[in-house]
């Protein structure tokens, strides 16, 4: 009986899935081929106990990988039906995908799929060019397509108010020695298939910076190469904050990031105000939105760069056992 998926298609989709973003580029996912479908699982060995004690970051990352998986299969003409958290007794199984009715991919799916290998976090200063209204609208539509919302902070007062929340959260986190040590464990000074290369960590933060930056061992910036004084800041949120909401937010995050990449935009993520519960609540109240903030992004136009390395897909892919 034709299952609708071939092993080759699923392996190609998993190859796209591992290009998703994750905290410190830990790549905390596994993919399991079973009974004609593919499942996304949390990899417990790649959790961040100090940075992500409740698993929020893992679920966001696995949701982003799930979106790439969905998109890859749709672009191949073999879209999938998705069940989130399908097995109550196995909470580490984030989603199961089984074949849906075959169809031709839409132009939008093809464009987003083509953006997967080009997407990366750009932690360098952006150019002063403003993001046009049509691009902003497209990013909001990308979040809404996944059942989430995207709030753009417009104006100096709104951005400054957010910056104070973000800097306060950053100070709280930096006072935790375990948090700092865990981040340093994932900084890579030599080529590696995971973690954040020091060359991709962005420039070192300086006192005049409006927004905080993590210390990934980046280079000192050139004179006069400050960050933009009025960045476009976007807050991604979901209706609730259950595990399913967080996986959905991860899918929305990846759709927004790919839409930004396809639009020629650069993005970096600021999760500090999400990681500190009091800061997250303060951010929620300041927005006046129903739901829960799940990620913050800085968006603009920047210098071309390159994606961080990824592990070989076979390291994250569990193939079915073939019995003779």
Image (spheres, grey):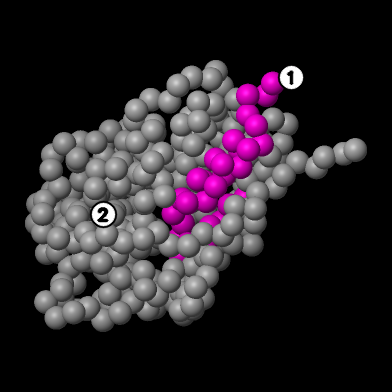
Q: Which of the labelled discs sits on residue 111, or is there none?
A: none
- Answer above or below: position of 145 versus 173: above
Q: How far across and down, in percent of the image, does residue 175 sit?
A: 39, 78
- Answer above or below: position of 162 versus 198: above
Rate crowding at label 1 as few (under 14), some (14 to 19) or many (20 or more) other CA atoms within 10 Å. Answer: few
Q: Residue at x 26, y 40 (%)?
A: 139
Task: Work out whether residue 86 can be spotted.
Answer: no
Q: How far across and down, in percent of the image, does residue 151 sit?
A: 24, 43
Based on the picture, tell me whether residue 3 belongs to the magenta stretch: yes
Residue range in magenta is: 1-30
Q: Is residue 127 left or right of residue 116?
A: left
Q: Is residue 260 left or right of residue 307?
A: left
Q: How far across and down, in percent of the image, does residue 19 sit?
A: 47, 51
For marks 2 and 1, give the one nearer the viewer.
1
- Answer above or below: position of 15 versus 227: above
Task: Work out whether residue 113 can be spotted.
Answer: yes
Labelled pair 2, 1 in contact (Cβ < 8 Å): no
The disc, 2 or 1, on the residue closer to the chain's N-terminal end is: 1
The front one of 155 and 227 is 227
* Quarter-of-image position of residue 258: top left
Rate crowding at label 2 as few (under 14), some (14 to 19) or many (20 or more) other CA atoms within 10 Å. Answer: many
Based on the picture, tell me whether residue 305 belongs to the magenta stretch: no
Name the residue that disc number 1 marks.
Answer: 1
Q: Residue at x 71, y 36 (%)?
A: 34
Q: Is residue 11 left or right of residue 126?
A: right
* Quarter-of-image position of residue 150: top left
Q: Circle 2 — which element?
A: strand
Q: What distance separates the C-alpha of mark 2 from that of mark 1? A: 45 Å
Q: Circle 1 — which element?
A: loop
Q: Residue at x 59, y 57 (%)?
A: 312
Residue at the right extreme of this rendering: 324
Q: Which of the labelled discs sits on residue 266, or is there none?
A: 2
């Amino acid at each position: 009986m034709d299952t609708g998926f071939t092993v080759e298609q699923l392996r190609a989709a998993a190859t796209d899935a591992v290009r998703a973003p994750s905290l410190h580029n830990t790549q905390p996912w596994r993919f399991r081929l079973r009974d004609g479908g593919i499942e996304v699982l949390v990899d417990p060995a790649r959790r961040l106990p100090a940075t992500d004690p409740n698993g929020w970051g893992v679920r966001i990352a696995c949701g982003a990988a799930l979106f790439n998986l969905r998109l890859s299969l749709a672009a191949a003409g073999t879209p999938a039906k998705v069940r989130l958290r399908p097995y109550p007794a196995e909470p580490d199984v984030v989603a199961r995908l089984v074949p849906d009715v075959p169809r031709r991919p839409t132009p939008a799916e093809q464009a987003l799929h083509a953006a997967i290998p080009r997407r990366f976090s750009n932690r360098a200063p952006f150019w002063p060019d403003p993001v046009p209204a049509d691009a902003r609208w497209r990013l909001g539509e990308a979040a809404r397509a996944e059942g989430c919302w995207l709030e753009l902070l417009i104006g100096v007062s709104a951005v400054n108010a957010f910056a104070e929340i973000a800097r306060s959260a950053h100070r709280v986190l930096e006072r935790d020695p375990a948090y700092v040590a865990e981040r340093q464990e994932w900084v890579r000074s030599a080529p590696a298939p995971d973690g954040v290369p020091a060359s991709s960590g962005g420039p070192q933060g300086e006192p005049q910076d409006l927004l905080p930056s993590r210390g990934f061992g980046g280079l000192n910036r050139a004179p006069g190469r400050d960050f933009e004084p009025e960045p476009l800041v976007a807050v991604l949120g979901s209706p609730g904050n259950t595990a399913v909401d967080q996986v959905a937010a991860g899918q929305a995050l990846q759709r927004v990031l790919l839409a930004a990449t396809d639009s020629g935009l650069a993005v970096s993520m600021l999760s500090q105000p999400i990681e500190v519960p009091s800061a997250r609540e303060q951010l929620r109240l300041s927005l006046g939105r129903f739901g829960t903030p799940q990620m913050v992004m800085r968006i603009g136009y920047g210098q071309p760069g390159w994606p961080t390395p990824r592990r070989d897909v076979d390291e994250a892919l569990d193939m079915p056992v073939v019995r003779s």
